[in-house]
Image (cartoon, helix red, strand yellow):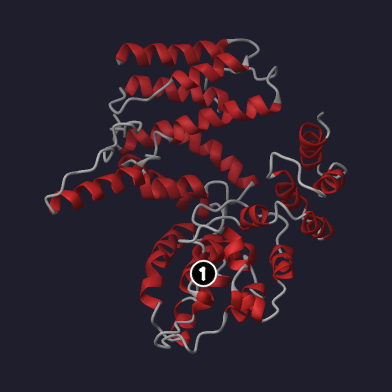
Amino acid sequence: MRQTLDAAIHRLEEAIAIRPAHYEPLLEAFRALEVPGDVPAGDLSRIYEACFAILGIKGAQSFDASALAPREAGHITYCARDVVERTMHDPDGRTRRWIAERRQWHEARGLEIPEGYDDSELPPALTLPWDETDASRHIRPFLDHLEAQVREQPLSHLSLCWKVRHEGYPVFRAVMVRWMKDLEKKGLGPPGTVAAFDTVDRLDGLGFELEDEPWATVCDKLMGLLEDEHPMVAAAAGRCLGGLVADEGGEDEEDGRRADWPRLPKLLDLLRSVKGHRVHVAGGFVDGFDTSAMEGLGGLKSQALLADAGFDFEQWVLDILAQDPLEPYLPNAQAFWFYVHECYDLDPAFSHRLLDADRSFVALMCATERDERVEGMAAVLERLAGDADTWIADAARRHLDRVYRAP
């Protein structure tokens, strides 16, 4: 394995040294690179140095990306960042825990463990060759690189910090907490992120405590958090609420335990009036509501309580989207636009309404979701092809040419 790892790193170093860089050698080098569980310190340092070069981190080997197409450069940059981040957290940690829990469950009952209940097909978890001080020193250039991105995109670091908090290798957990606190001291990113992570974890289990409580208790424990200043807390509160009302709008018809809870139309009106991170709250709400059915926004739209009340669901969606032109990714709840584009991918009329409401990105996602012709959607794409955002316009033209104009 040592020889194989050395050869894989050398292959990546050679691909980086090509002037100007070529896409295929870099891609093949990343495909051949698998970091073993017992990676030696020297090899891990070389891997960092190679990835740092691609990311343009000062002090690393020089890298010339001038001949790469934008998509190629973006993909190679993603590969380099992904390799570094996978040394900080175990992306398969949750799966490993589930497998271990299922094995323990069968063993405790004297049952035969079903075939496939092992993690032999997963990439290895790492035993890092550094202590916390060494890990902090080696990862510092990467964190400085990310800090520059946080200055431009204040939520860009949340995903990695969240992954390290929950699936991180021990030497990196404390490093990342210190880094988040340093960012807050510098006024970077949303304030209170470390405390927000604690609140989000608490909210993840709060639904079980509130499911049989009167509405006044729910309001006391949850509703104020829908307008929390931190977007992850607001989204988590929305997700918790969505899970609570998933059963026919939150009414328990068998014993009347929720007789005082507002009906679903009123709850959606409440979300429509949320100040602050409304779109994140709504995305979290649908995420929680959809936990078991896996029907997305369509599962909410199809609720009989809404039809009976004559609720204008499409207008509700537009009202949710109206407040925030952009919806940065959050690691603890699905984005609202994602649910919208899956629900309305066959509805060109609604895509036109999105365009009229200046929500071109969401309209583009709806119009390009299907890799096949959708009646009436070509007109949406024609409008998008003239969008002021060149990325949106180019994507619309490509989809038109490939799906609608091809013979």
On screen, residue 46 above or below 285: above
On screen, residue 331 above or below 218: above
On screen, residue 337 above or below 174: below
Query: Dot 1: few (<14), some (14–19), or many (≥20) neighbours within 10 Å?
Result: many
Question: What's the residue at 34%, 33% (across, down)?
Answer: 122
Count of all numbered marks drawn on residues in the image: 1
Question: What's the residue at 44%, 82% (across, down)?
Answer: 252
Callout 1, which amino acid? Gly
Q: Residue furthest left?
A: 110
The image quadrant where one finds the C terminus is: top right
Query: Picture coordinates of residue 401 (x, y %)?
Result: 81, 32
Which image quadrant is residue 43 in?
A: top left
Q: Is 116 on the left-hand or right-hand side of 214?
A: left
Can you see residue 141? no
The residue tagged 1 is 242
On screen, residue 307 above or below 337: below
The image quadrant where one finds the N terminus is: top left
Query: Picture coordinates of residue 324 (x, y %)?
Result: 70, 61
Query: Picture coordinates of residue 195 (x, y %)?
Result: 44, 62
Which image quadrant is residue 56 in?
A: top right
The front one of 161 and 375 is 375
- Judged from the image, the secondary structure of the residue bearing numbered disc 1 is helix
Query: Picture coordinates of residue 297 (x, y %)?
Result: 61, 61
Question: What's the residue at 65%, 20% (across, down)?
Answer: 65
Can you see residue 278? yes
The front one of 77 and 184 is 77
The front one of 48 and 1 is 1
